[in-house]
Image (cartoon, helix red, strand yellow):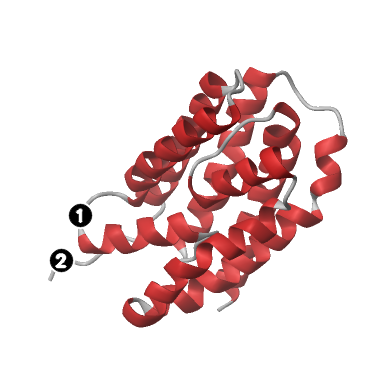
Amino acid sequence: MVQKIVSIIIGSVCVAIGINCFLIPNHLLDGGIIGLGLIAKYTVGLQPGLTIIVLSLPLYMIAWFHYRKYFYNGLHGLLFSSFLIDYFRPLSHMYTAPILISSLTGGLLIGTGVGIMLLANISTGGTDLLALMLSKLTSINVGIYILMIDSIVILFGWIVIQEATITYSAIMVLMVGLTTSFITSCFAPKRNRS
């Protein structure tokens, strides 16, 4: 129980800082539900954290019926990380690093936060939850699923927003996917084969 609480706190802080300090000031896109929340912020000014919660609801309904453990574990991560994303909003008005450094640093922070939470079977939103469910059905690492979903959302964001940050957003998503994959592969508990 304590490990889950610590994972939620540390992971959510990493994600919220990555988004507010590095992504939003440079209009970078992320993938998944977080990316959709950022697209909503950039296009119509909605709060990304609240948007993440609303868009995650359908996947949490699926989890309620088929993966009840993920529903309970993921709900806390979703609510806390979304709250911190909106709570840390003032950080997005502070000085930020150049766009390449921001895409790498933001990707590293978000990937670390997501990876820490996924190790405890906690997710930050809908597509992380979807990736966890797909990973359970197959033998493919959860980070690979996140990378594929994120790429689709980045492409959608680029079409909708038409900003010149697609290359840096793609670098950032790649960094998130690689970091998440590294953390979930290297630090996951080993299973006994008896």
Query: Is 45 drawn above or below residue 136 in the view shown?
Result: above
Residue drawn 86% across the image and 36% down it: 93
Residue drawn 63% across the image and 30% down it: 28
On screen, residue 175 versus residue 23, left or right, reads left
Residue drawn 56% across the image and 43% down it: 35
On screen, residue 101 versus residue 150, left or right, reads right
Look at the image and tell me in which quarter the C terminus lies: bottom left
Query: Is 146 drawn above or below residue 62 in the view shown?
Result: above
Report the Cα–Cα distance between label 2 and label 1: 15 Å
Residue drawn 74% across the image and 41% down it: 20
Alpha-carbon neighbours of circle 2 within 10 Å: few (<14), some, or many (≥20)?
Answer: few
**Which quadrant holds residue 17?**
top right
Can residue 105 be spotted in the picture? yes
Disc 2, disc 1: CB below 8 Å?
no
On screen, residue 162 versus residue 80, left or right, reads left
- Residue 149 drawn at (x, y percent): 39, 44
Give whichever of 6, 78 is nearer the camera. 78
Give whichever of 101, 192 is nearer the camera. 101
- Residue 84 drawn at (x, y percent): 73, 58
**Residue named by callout 2:** 193
Can residue 7 be spotted in the picture? no
Alpha-carbon neighbours of circle 1 within 10 Å: few (<14), some, or many (≥20)?
Answer: few
- Amino acid type at circle 2 is Arg
Residue 139: image tag: 1
**Count of marks, rendered view:** 2
Q: What element carries label 1?
A: loop
Name the mark nearer the viewer: 2 or 1. Answer: 1
